[in-house]
Amino acid sequence: MAGGGDAERLGGLRWRRRWWVMVRDGSLEAVDWARFEGPPWYRPDEVPVALRALAGAVSPEAGRAAYDAVLFAIGNNHAGRLYPAAAAAVPFVVEVATTGHGYSRYAALDILIDVLSAFEAEDGFGALPNGRPLMHAVAEPIVDERGRFAEALTSPDGELCRRATELLEVIDGWERPGSAVEA
C-alpha cells in the first residue's frame, strides 16, 4: 500500500543521508552553533566535536566519554540543564540512536533517556527566539521517532533492547509541561 508508510520511509532515507553528510564529511560545522544563546560557559565549538565523538564511539569508554561530551556541550550535565543548542543537537542524537551501531547507539539512547526524563532548560534560556519552549523543541524529535525506537526491540542485542525499552517508557510517560489537565 502506497501512502504514509512510503513517505515516512523516504523521509527517513533523506534524514539518514543528511546525517551521514553532516557527520562524515565535516559539514556539521555548517550549523551555526554560535547563534544559540547560553550562559557564559556555553562553548558552541564543542557541540559538533561532541556529536562526532558520539557517532564514532566504538568502545564502552568512548561511548561514556561521548555521552558526557554531548551533555556538557548542549547543557550542564551535572545540573541537569539544557541550553538552546540542544534543540538543534537532539535530532542528530536521535539519528545516532536509531541508525548507529554498538556503543555509539547505546550512548545516544542514554542521552535521549536523560534529556527527556531528567533535564530542564537552563534558567533564563527556557524559550527559543521564536518563543517556543526549549523543552518542547528538545522533546519533539524524540517523541516523534517513537516508532523507530520501537524497532530496536526486535534486535538480538540485549543492551540495545534494554535501552530502547527504557526510552520508550520515558517517551510514554512524558507530558508536555502545561498540558496536564487540572482536576
Image (cartoon, rainbow, N blue to C red):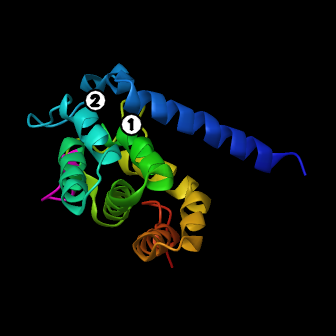
Q: Residue at x 36, y 40 (%)?
A: 89
Residue bounds of the magenta highlight: 75-80
Between 113 and 24, the one lying in front of the other is: 24
Q: Amino acid at mark 2?
A: Phe
Q: Position of residue 17 (x, y in %)?
A: 55, 33
Q: Secondary structure at mark 2?
A: loop
Is 77 in the magenta? yes
Q: Amino acid at mark 1?
A: Ala
- Answer whether residue 158 is visible to the viewer in this image: yes
Q: Is residue 94 above or below residue 118?
A: above
Q: Residue at x 70, y 45 (%)?
A: 9
Q: Position of residue 43 (x, y in %)?
A: 15, 32
Q: Is residue 128 above or below residue 59?
A: above
Q: Work out whether mark 1 precedes mark 2 in sequence or the reverse, and give the earlier one.
A: 2
Tally of numbered discs = 2
165 to the left or right of 13: left
Is 130 in the magenta? no
Q: Which mark is residue 169?
A: none
Q: Residue at x 50, y 54 (%)?
A: 98
Residue labelled with disc 2:
36
